[in-house]
Image (cartoon, grey):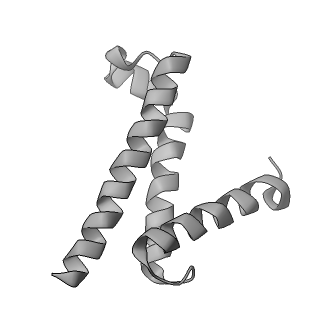
Amino acid sequence: MHLRQGLKPASERLSKLVSEVLGLPANHPQVLMGMSAIQGLCIWYRSSRTVAERMFPELQFTPERIDWMAEFIADFSLAGMRALVQNKKG
């Protein structure tokens, strides 16, 4: 995938979403860390599929399971970002 056509626009969209959830500018270190954490989860499942399947054979990377994993990563990430916001208010 070409950096300018694929990765950069996707990273910019993710940065904007994380920025909105955290209520911080897109270039804030917490936004960059949040974005990196989300990307890291996605990359791990994508690039370490063989390892993941061996560690967790019950995952079975079917299309339905991959959709479930994507939803889990989104829910997990949103919960983490909301906790960060709550901790700042509390």
The residue depicted at 43 percent of the width and 27 percent of the height is: 51
In the foreground, 27 or 48: 27
From this view, report whether residue 87 is shown above or below residue 83: below
x, y percentage for residue 22? 41, 74
x, y percentage for residue 26? 57, 79
From this view, report whether residue 36 is shown above or below residue 32: above
x, y percentage for residue 83? 25, 66
| Figure label count | 0
The residue depicted at 43 percent of the width and 33 percent of the height is: 69
Left or right of 80 in this view: 3: right
Left or right of 17 in this view: 30: left
Q: In which quarter of the view is residue 47 placed?
A: top right
The residue depicted at 53 percent of the width and 84 percent of the height is: 25
Quadrant of the snapshot with the C terminus: bottom left
In the foreground, 5 or 55: 5
In the foreground, 1 or 88: 88
x, y percentage for residue 34? 44, 66
